[in-house]
Amino acid sequence: MTTLAPPVRETRTRPAPARRKRSGRAAPYLFVLPALLLFAAFKLYPIGWSFVMSLHRTVAGVDTFVGADNYARLLDDPLFWTALRNTGVILAVQVPLMLALATGLAVALNSTLLNGRSVFRLGFFLPMVTGLVAYGIAFSVLLNKEYGLVNWLLGGLGLDPVPWLTDGLWAQISLGLALTWHYTGYNAVILLARLQTVPAELYDAAAVDGAGALAAFRHVTLPGLRPALLLTTVLSTIGTLQLFDEPFVLTGGGPDNATLTIGVYLYRNAFSYFDFGYASALAYALTVLIGLLGLLQFRLLGDKS
Amino acid sequence: MADGHTHNSTAHQAHLSRRSALRLGGGIAAAGLGTLGLTACSGDGAGTGGLGGGSGSGAKGDPKKGEITVWSWQGPAAELKSLVPEFNKTNPGIKVTVQDIGNPAIWDKITAGMAAGGQGLADVLHIGVDYLPGYVERFPGGLADLAPLGATAHKDSFAQGLWGTVSPDNKRVNALPWEANSAGFYYRADIFEKAGVDPDALQTWDDTIEAGKKIKAKTGVHLLGIDKPASQPDAANLFQTLLQLQGVFYFDLEGRITLDSPEAVRALTLIRTMNDAGLVSDLAGGWNALMSSLKKGTNAVVPYPTWFGGIIEEQVPAESGKWRVRLPPAVRPGGPTAATVNSTHLAVAGSSRHQAAAWAFIEFALTRPASQVKIYRGKGIAPALMKAYEDNVFHEPSKYFGGQRKGEIFLAALKAKSPAVNYTSDYARALKLVTDAQSKVLLKGAEPAEVLAEAAAELARQTGRKAAK
């Protein structure tokens, strides 16, 4: 017993530092608590609750637990696969094109040969500032087949009207054009920021080694841009998978679901069909996809070290 | 979170207000995507409906006092607003605020409110026949029962068939009918004359197609316009009218799927024949394109219901005297030419704390002939209230429509026997599949029978409903 009893002196001195230690430990938590509470209320809770909803189906106003039925229904839903295919096409075609364009733009905007660089930088970034719905509506008015400005101009050149929004393939092209207009400048600015950290000595060294402009781009610029390229690729992938506003405003997902995205389909199920359970299941499928694709991209493009 | 196609969070917030001005639901869904859930707008689930739904927690309140809000859209909203001063003469204690939410934005806004267990809903809601059964079925208690408030007394006041729409079980009253729209056939008399076609001689839609060919050859004007890529859900208006003229719909009265019936195939085939003959202009873009075509005179005919007459007068006032109206031709020789193609209603939110006051306003607006006459004079909105038709305004010649008694033409349709239509709670799904099927036919030359069979099968898969065969 006595051996277990702590020395008196020690018990006297201990509490003070211990208390200081404890309050020292609590302080950071107290500081993050407001953010944590907000996160829990507005992110964590909806995330958790929508998972619960995804396991239910509403029949005549009564929510019935149906287990994984909504997820099974998903795999069997031709429109889900159509939406996924459309998203895949944008991912495979529009995103690489846009990022290539953004890289070229970043290099051009970084060039010392360019006069009035800040004006150009601002000009290319400005589309990003316009509201999604506003620019969607502007594009849909411009691209209207019978009454739009674009076809009127094409008509002036003696060309036939293009079914920008009324033909499946053209609608996909129009959507790609709108996205490219809106987001290229934004990506270019991210790339530009990274580009400015590439030391000029590397270009000098490359020049000494006899590298031309193209070789310098390949062996200095691109490796230097790698982390920014990874970032823009991952962000664009997430953005594409969540794509909603543009197709919703521009085409409503049509014609005949040619521009249907998972976001639009989710919205339709929740707000037109009142099928919140199925819509939640769609949201979860989307999250899993985004997670998997993000992981894959980090593996492929990320720094090995 | 910033990314390529969405936006960083500050930009997101800046966008929200603009976006919500246009489409509240769109904003919510986008935000929901960001946070991965729809619950952000589905309340605490405390209502008796369970997860998403919620039973109304409102109260009757004082029938003489209170502040009530009314949600409607465009023309109807303006007319309701103009009724308020008169209403306040007899009900000085009730303060009425009418809000023009816009159509189709109002449906998303009501849906979001219903899903949140009634949170944020107005007291009085203007609801179309296409949405009413869905709201009633998916959100029990979302709309107040008007029977205890005295609605049943007005049972026989409305155009036939409409009581069944607002009170399917003949006990609970979900809403009170306002507009009753019959299928119409607005046409440019000057263009018909130029082409040497007698519009009154058109007995069937086959006759109409032949007339359309003549009109196109002589004047270059299209017979009519359709939103071919279905950029708006109302792209199927003509198809639906052709179905109703044959006494069928997407569902039968038992709720079984009938959208691939022989009548439906015939309707879609008629539309394809018109399109193949080059008689159909493209109204891609929906409402705006329709208004542009009206101003440009692209089409000789607009086969729209009663309410569209008011729109024509408002949009192209200079064309006074050139327009006429008649009931649409029959699909089969000697077949019916009258069909009630839609109705709208006023309902009270189940969550409202001033239900009695809300009901007082509804009763004033919808069951008092003078109110309905005023609304008809203002915007040409045709009442379901039969007593209103005793007023002279429905029987006097219209100067704009070349001296025709437009009110009487549609009154005759309203009095004709019109089969009941079962919209069901799955109307939105059916309509989407129908518009897609129509797009396939008009844009890709698909076979009507085939696409309708596919649509019916897909509808059965999505809803678990049986086919009516």
Image: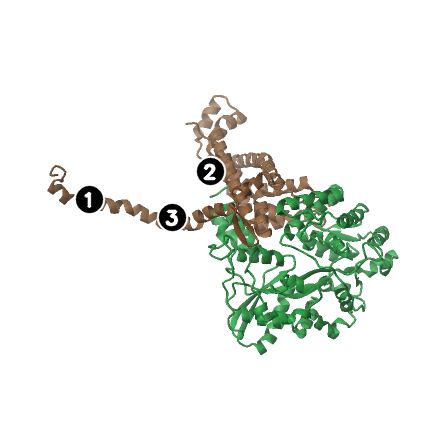
Viewport quadrant of the N terminus of chain A: top left
Label 3 vs 2, first from the N-terminus? 3
Q: Viewed as shown, does residue A29 lie left or right of B196?
A: left
Which numbered circle lies on residue B32? none
Q: What letter labels the chain drawn in brown?
A: A
* Residue drawn at the location 25% of the way across and 47% of the way down: A23
Q: Is residue B244 visible?
A: yes
Relative vertical location of residue A131 with respect to residue A220 in this rendering, above or below:
below
The residue to which callout 1 is attached is A17
Of badges 2 and 1, the one in the foreground is: 1
Q: Which mark is residue A193?
A: 2
Task: Name the residue type under label 2.
Answer: Ala
The picture's colour for chain B is green
Answer above or below: position of B218 versus A199: below
**Which is more N-terminal, label 1 or label 3?**
1
Q: Quadrant of the C terminus of chain A?
A: top left
Q: x, y (%) of residue A13?
A: 14, 44
Please report the residue visible at 53 percent of the width from the left and 39 percent of the height from the top.
Answer: A236
The percent coordinates of residue B79 (x first, y second) are 64, 68
Discs 3 and 1 share one subunit: yes
Residue hosting label 3: A36
Q: Which chain is home to disc 2?
A: A
Where disc 2 sits, the SS reads helix
Q: Position of residue A230 (x, y in %)?
A: 48, 34
Please tell me in which quadrant of the rendered image residue B87 appears.
bottom right
Position in image of residue A45 (x %, y %): 44, 49
Identity, as a three-letter code, of the amino acid under mark 1: Pro
